[in-house]
Amino acid sequence: MSRSFLDLALPGVQQLSPYVPGKPVEELAREFNLNPADIVKLASNENPLGPSPKVCQAIEQALPELTRYPDGSGFALKSQLATHYNVDAAQITLGNGSNDILELVARAWLAPGSNAIFSEHAFAVYPIATLASGAECRQVPANNYGHDLEAMAAAIDSNTRVVFIANPNNPTGTWFDQAALNSFLAKVPADVLVVLDEAYIEYAADTDLPDGMAYLSRYPNLLVSRTFSKAYGLAALRVGYAISSLDIAEVLNRVRQPFNVNSLALVAACAALQDQDYLERSRDNNKQGMQQLEAGFKKLGLSWLPSKGNFIAVEFQGDAAAINQALLEQGVIVRPVAGYGMANFLRVSIGTATENQRFLDVLTQVLQQD
Ligand SMILES: *Cc1c(COP(=O)(O)O)cnc(C)c1O
């Protein structure tokens, strides 16, 4: 028999497990013959408020230009971001989602013989990007589900090119404070790139989470990655960005696709950045929803991991797969996290008050049954 194309793939590609996304509403509707309108999806950390009307307007205005290639330099969005964060526009790299940024980092700096460090229970894209580039994954055991930054710094060796850290982390919602980041960055050698993934940082305003942007001038080996997918509510459009030293940005610019962010995403992100009221509403909804879910879990005698994101990992006695299945049958989609080494947990994204209540009601019913 001839060898399969999997056998012929790069060794790292053979080892990697594909990313498992949250189940789409339409798919569940087909599977259980449910009305999509009755389904609640709290599985992908999406913004439950829907997009900002200002974003929709901007997209409409851009439609007549669909025959043109996007501005490959992303001039308008970079200028706005540069003003917003008080950085040089040349320090910014735009990505097709911040996922793209993570992959660009892997493509530029990781290869067979080098390694990348990340934490146990960290975002699934770190091992995927690392393995696909042929590099070694160094997964460092978590400390009570959060990053053990000291152990991560200690795991660095002469072949380490990248350390991925997420604050807050997905799917755990765990976070580290300024003191921990200060001490970590001070230990990382200057030629090891630190990717500080702040996909959820907008939800953590007014907390003890450090602002990655404040560290850029001191650490030329730091890259801060952010996204419009979460608090800004633009997950469908795929737009994220990195802010780093010029040195790092210049390399990323070499490996990115010339038109990696599409025109509608560019105009939408500009409009979203200007609509800080929307961001405020997103935060408020999140804060209230988090309290609602925590109160519900408490009533049910469940424990959870305190979270600074727009999601919460709730723990069950034993494997949560059956509970997940029962929720699905009732039209409630949450995220199993067994693939993250957390088989007893389900990750629930914060929805609207109505969606959260529906989830809690169905969960109560499901737990009473078994
Ligand atoms: C959602 C997420 C991202 C990337 O999302 P994009 O939609 O690609 O911007 C990156 N990191 C973490 C930790 C996430 O949860």
Image (cartoon, rainbow, N blue to C red):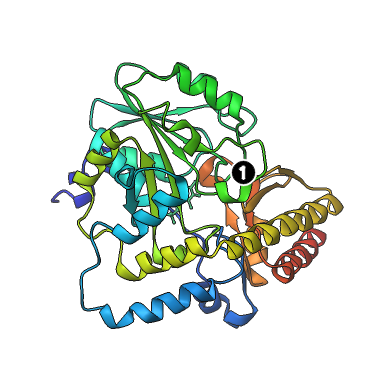
Residue at 61% in and 34% down: 145
Residue at 42% in and 20% down: 188
Above or below residue 50? Residue 192 is above
Image location of residue 17, percent across then percent down = 38, 47
Asked whether 204 or 303 is in front, the reply is 204
Q: Quadrant of residue 34?
A: bottom right
Asked whether 108 or 269 is in front, the reply is 269
Residue at 41% in and 45% down: 125
Task: Determine which residue is flagged by label 1.
Answer: 173
Image location of residue 16, percent across then percent down = 35, 43
Quadrant containing the C terminus is: bottom right
Q: Is mark 1 within 8 Å of ligand 1?
A: no
Residue at 59% in and 29% down: 178
Above or below residue 279? Residue 129 is above
Q: Quadrant of residue 350?
A: bottom right
Image location of residue 127, percent across then percent down = 39, 39
Left or right, residue 302 beside residue 148:
right
Left or right, residue 328 beside residue 11:
right
Image location of residue 339, percent across then percent down = 51, 45
Q: Quadrant of residue 366?
A: bottom right
